Image (cartoon, grey):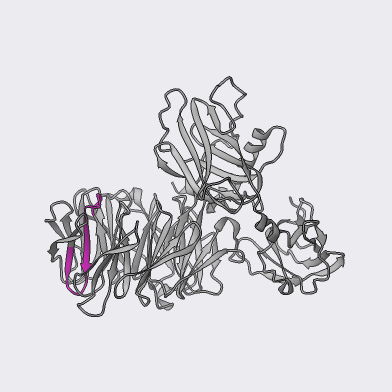
Amino acid sequence: MKAVYKGLGLLLVFGLAFGAGLYLFDSRLPEPAQPAASAGDSGNRLVRDGIAVEFSVQPVDGGVPTEGMFADLRFRLSDAASGQPLAGQVPGAWLDPATGNDDPQTACRSRIGLYLKGLPGVRPLLDLTSYYLLILNQDPSITVVDPLTSVGGVTSMLTRIPLRGAPMDWVASPAERRLYVSMPEAGEVAVIDAERFQVLAGIPAGERPVRLALQPDGRYLWVGNDASGEAGSGVTVIDTATLKTVLQTDTGRGHHEIAFSADSRHAFVSSREAGTLTVFDVATLSRLREIRSGPHPLGVALSPLSGAVYVSDGEAGTLSVIDASSLEMRKTIPVGRGIGPLAFAPDGRHGFVLNTADNTATVIDAASDEVVHRLEVAAEPYQIAFTRAFAYVRGLASPKVSMIDLASLGKGREPGVLGFEAGPAAPRLAGNLPLASSLAPAGDDAALFVVNPVDNTTYFYMEGMNAPMSGYLNRGHTARAATVVPRSLRELEPGLFGARVRLPAAGRLDVAFLLNQPQIAHCFGLEVRADPERQRRRATLRVEYLVDGHGVVAGAPFTLRFRLLQGDADLPRAGVADLRVRYFLAPSSQPREVAAQEVGEGIYEAPVELEQAGAYYLHVGADSLGLKFGDLPYLALRARPAGGR
């Protein structure tokens, strides 16, 4: 297994690691089907190998597709003969300007191959196999990062979302493409549009709203209120459709953790100081039962496999097992004093209980409700996250992240425990840590983002590597937690896959589509109308890099030459005295800046020192023009070793 992960990691070194989908298929993409006599084939419908693929686009606000507009892209997959939907697939899609090639489908296959290689400077206008990285800051804000277009933290920030108060916890609703953020001091929950990255609303959510939990069916958002006194300490329930509060009730003093039955029938709310677990009937929002599971309940989690709720008690050192249907106590499992955080792997089979006092993770088998492992992990473990293959445990007193191989778990086995360093120092040195997790599984199920609040960097780790591949420095803010918002295609109903996107450019676009099994690679056409206002803004200034595509030799003198053009007529923009070039070596070197001098009308040169071999990214900026680094397109340049290729 380790060798397989290492091989995948090498494939992804220059950027494919940041994509949400990993497509394992023969690099020789299937030849385009020859034109066949099929009455159903058209510009938006393809029939190949017995599979029908229908493409459609619908602007969210109606009308015709226009650049800058949000639109729903849809791909319907079905059996060509029977019409039955082809469910459970993982298709990929990319948008880019049409090539105008005489053989468009051959050019399309070549493009898809380049997209999958993830080469520096070779990326589409829109990648629907990827995701956004969101970083929760200590100040009232969230940083949005586009990993595909950012390297080394210099061009990483796509945008910043301001909040009304410092954030503490968050939870995402993939179906609604929303993000909910608790702000204890403001007494609100912020509702964020995860498509436009804008705050839609601030909902009053009781006194000190801290923990957030979303029901499995997405209907209600539950908010834990950590009020200082008895009054106000409980839960607030918000209807996600109306964004109105439907319940606010006290459950007892102390911090509250929240879990749900798999069918969203019951909600379970712990009250740490009161020593209770309150059970609610979700349909009526009424209180059903109050269970005393121990004097100091700390963690609450449900296993859908066993149909039980598990409550860890740090003072008693026990794990209570409560039937999620009958609400009766099944069993009490002795684990050890000091236990707290609790979570189950995605399949619900194995639960992990962290013990901050003795630096261990106890593994429970939900099939038998027995302890099967007690593993040493990072010092003072306090957070846990899962990918398909591993459980990741973060410690407060160490920069190390422990990795537990899920496939190696089981009675009588010796689990594999690995680890890697995520930053230079232990998270506890930063202080003021939120409840939101510093661990965020990436979209491809084989990678992880880890926030180190001490050096303000979010590290990207690919399974199989010895150390993180790269890091994102959160300049201007203090990183505390991370989560991932997918922008990949989702299965909306059996056989129907789609995504809501902002149409990136006007003109004729190719919508490249890839299906792995059977292997289908095809480009559909999409005509996007120009937005006059965007055209006007775009016409103000543009850059043209006067560099050939063969790269340069590392260590050899190199002068970057580029032209600034302005207006619809592309007139030279001359006389810019404070023009500068910022550049850095991917993936994470410190950026360097150098002044550019005008050598012709609108033509500028800047001496750039490319000392090491590798991929460099270069940006142009000028304060006098209000031109920030990243406002204009960047140049990706490869420096090859002296005497090498």
Q: Is residue 412 above or below residue 557?
A: above
Quarter of the image where one finds residue 159: bottom right
Count of marks, rendered view: 0
Q: Is residue 163 above or below residue 14?
A: below
Magenta residues, as a range? 261-278
| Of 287 and 440, the residue lying toward us | 287
- Tell me, yes or no, whether the highlighted magenta stretch contains residue 252: no
Q: Residue at x 80, y 74 (%)?
A: 577
Estimate the x, y position of residue 613 in percent, counting from the top left: 70, 59
- Tell me, yes or no, whether the highlighted magenta stretch contains residue 272: yes
Farthest-out residue, right: 600
Is residue 617 at all visible to an observer of this figure? yes
Is residue 613 at all visible to an observer of this figure? no
Estimate the x, y position of residue 203 in percent, counting from the top left: 36, 68
Residue 226 horizontal side relative to residue 397, left or right: left
Quarter of the image where one finds residue 232: bottom left
Q: Residue at x 55, y 58 (%)?
A: 147
Estimate the x, y position of residue 7 in percent, counting from the top left: 52, 47
| Of 641 and 11, the residue lying toward us | 11
